[in-house]
Image (cartoon, rainbow, N blue to C red):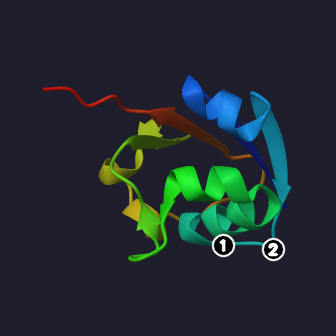
Amino acid sequence: MIVNVRFVGSLRSVSGKSRMTLDLEKNVPLKEALRRLAEKKPKLGRALIDTEFDDPRLNALVIVNDKEISVLDGLNTMLKNRDEIVFVPVLHGG
């Protein structure tokens, strides 16, 4: 199963590319795709995954097939062949 991944903004620089594909088993949750990304690109993994809690950090918006994951099943959103994941950095200020 192929999943397309797109990086926006500063995450494009961290990943070294704007797009990539992941070859995954069938019916894996989003959190497994995140783990695979971290294995392939450790620097990107550190930008996306809080190693203490093993969850995406709040400074990244994660979109699967044009829907933010909070309206889906969060990290348990099941991925299908040819799905697209988009990672968008979120800036915080004060």
Q: Position of residue 76 (x, y in %)?
A: 46, 70
Q: Is residue 16 above or below residue 29?
A: above
Which quadrant of the structure image shows residue 61?
top left
Q: Where is residue 38 in the image (x, y as percent from the top left)?
A: 69, 62
Rendering coords of residue 33 (x, y %): 66, 64
- All told, the count of numbered labels is 2
Image point (45%, 33%), residue name: 89
Amino acid type at circle 2 is Glu
Q: Is residue 47 above or below residue 6?
A: below
Query: According to the image, label 1 marks what residue?
Result: 28
- Apparent side of residue 41 relative to residue 63 in the rendered image (left or right): right
Label 1 sits on a secondary structure element that is loop
- What residue lies at 54% left-to-right and 50% top-to-bottom? 47
Element type where label 2 sits in the image: loop
* Res. 6 mark: none
Query: Disc 2 marks which residue?
Result: 25
Q: Nearer the viewer, residue 36 or 94?
A: 94
Q: Residue at x 43, y 39 (%)?
A: 67
Q: Do the residues labelled 2 and 1 touch (CB within 8 Å)?
A: yes
- Residue occupying the point 48% across, 72% down: 51
Residue 40 horizontal/vertical position (percent): 81, 60
Q: In this view, does 76 lie above or below 43?
A: below
Q: Quadrant of the N terminus?
A: bottom right
Q: In this view, does 66 lie to the left or right of 3?
A: left
Label 1 sits on what residue type? Val
